[in-house]
Amino acid sequence: MAEIRRWLSLIGHGFASMFDLLMLTAGSALIGLAITVLLDGFGVRTLALTNNAGSMFGSALLIAVFGSFALGVANEGPIGHGIYAARLAPLELAMVRALAITTLSLVGVWAAGSIPGLVEELPYPFELTAVAVEQVSRAGLFFALLIGVPATYAMRFFFADRIKGEDWELPVILVIWFLGAMILISGAL
């Protein structure tokens, strides 16, 4: 019974931590998109995302609200509570992180697939929001899973005496996920 509780706690911590990283990445992408819509509306960049001021302000405001919500959700999560993870074997933690990233990314890709039907009558920036969410989720599958998790496993395996908790591991996954999302978003547009 104690072993089952330990694994449930491990899975819960892994999913919560990776969900926070997903929300940080998605929130940052959406805030960046909102800023881009505002810059386009004010003529700083000419991308022709919107056709009038009301559409520009409304789109930017709503996208920024969603991005801020994602960042707020991540802020309230377990990031920074890595004391629990310090007691885990590197392979256990890597397996749970891989499972969490795969599951959350697949759910994100599925959710992004349903967004276009909801926003087809809204201004173009909302279609870009769906693209951003989808590419952030795909970056989880291709970058965070295939590069971030092995990198943190290697860090924990080779530098276990210097690295305590997740203070160095989660930022590594976040930076890799974020850079991957930037690459995929710029390629999709």
Image (cartoon, rainbow, N blue to C red):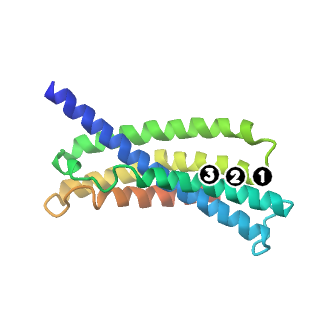
Circle on res. 132:
3
- Identify the residue shown where x is 68% and y is 58%: 61
Check the image and report above or below for 22 versus 175: above
Res. 63 in view: yes
Q: CA distance from mark 2 to mark 1?
A: 7 Å
Return the x and y of residue 12 as percentages of the image width and height: 32, 37
Q: Are marks 3 and 2 in contact (CB under 8 Å)?
A: yes
- Identify the residue shown where x is 81% and y is 57%: 55
- Identify the residue shown where x is 37% and y is 37%: 99
Provide the secondary structure element on which disc 3 rests.
Answer: helix
Tell me: 92 left or right of 38.
left
Circle on res. 124:
1
Circle on res. 164:
none
**Which residue is nearer to you in this view: 143 or 117?**
117
Return the x and y of residue 45 as percentages of the image width and height: 75, 72
Check the image and report above or below for 147 versus 53: above
**Which residue is nearer to you in this view: 117 or 53?**
53
Check the image and report above or below for 96 versus 59: above
Circle on res. 128:
2
Q: CA distance from mark 3 to mark 1?
A: 13 Å
Q: Quadrant of the N terminus?
A: top left
Q: Residues within 10 Å of mark 2 (few under 14, many from 20)?
A: some
Tell me: 19 left or right of 165.
right
Q: Are marks 2 and 1 in contact (CB under 8 Å)?
A: yes
